[in-house]
Image (cartoon, rainbow, N blue to C red):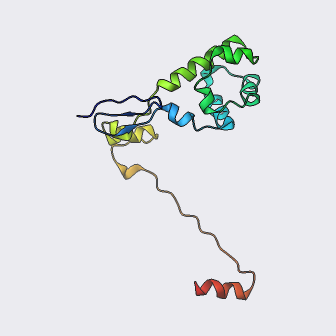
Amino acid sequence: MSEIVDTPTSTSTSVAGNETVSLADDIKKYDTVKLIDFLRGEKDLGLDDEDLEIIKKRKINGRAFLKITKEDLERHGMELGPASNIADFAKDCKEKKLKAFSSYRSLKEVLKKYGIDSNGTDTIPLFTLQTHEFKSLTSTSSIAWQKF
């Protein structure tokens, strides 16, 4: 039986030996634009364009976001409410683990995560291939293509 190992980068090894990645591991790779997009998607933070502009202007990327404090944000002009929300959210992100597929109990649980209500793979929609027609510009180019 393996032990749970918690490291400063917030990864851990589960009992089954599969690596579980934290949300922080993803976030720390975000540049400023991707971080802003991520924060914009978190509606309960109550951020407006002015708040996000402070993040952009101060060039806060994912790595800096995970270390941010309410005081840092207030010092740069963010109001108390959004500054508190972001600081709390950054702390929550550092602690949240992303669920590895191996930790799911059933295929149905995995499929449900992706919006498919089924017990099997028979209802997973297949992708359709797109075909494209290429017109040759000269007869020489079509001969060259035929050689390969």
Quarter-wise, where is residue 77 in the image?
top right
Quadrant placement of the N terminus: top left
Residue at 66 percent of width and 29 percent of height: 40
Q: In this view, which residue lies farthest toward the front? A: 8
Give left or right: position of 131 versus 4: right
Give left or right: position of 10 versus 140: left
Quarter-wise, where is residue 133 in the image?
bottom right
Q: Position of residue 99 (x, y in %)?
A: 41, 34
Q: Position of residue 47 (x, y in %)?
A: 68, 22
Residue at 72 percent of width and 31 percent of height: 59
Give left or right: position of 59 versus 118: right
Q: In this view, which residue lies farthest toward the left? A: 1
Residue at 42 percent of width and 50 percent of height: 124
User: Depth check: 108 or 51 in front?
Assistant: 51
Q: Is residue 62 visible?
A: yes
Image position of 34 with respect to 75: above or below: below
Q: Is residue 82 visible?
A: no
Image position of 136 with respect to 87: above or below: below
Q: In this view, which residue lies farthest toward the top? A: 80
Q: Position of residue 76 (x, y in %)?
A: 75, 18
Quadrant placement of the C terminus: bottom right
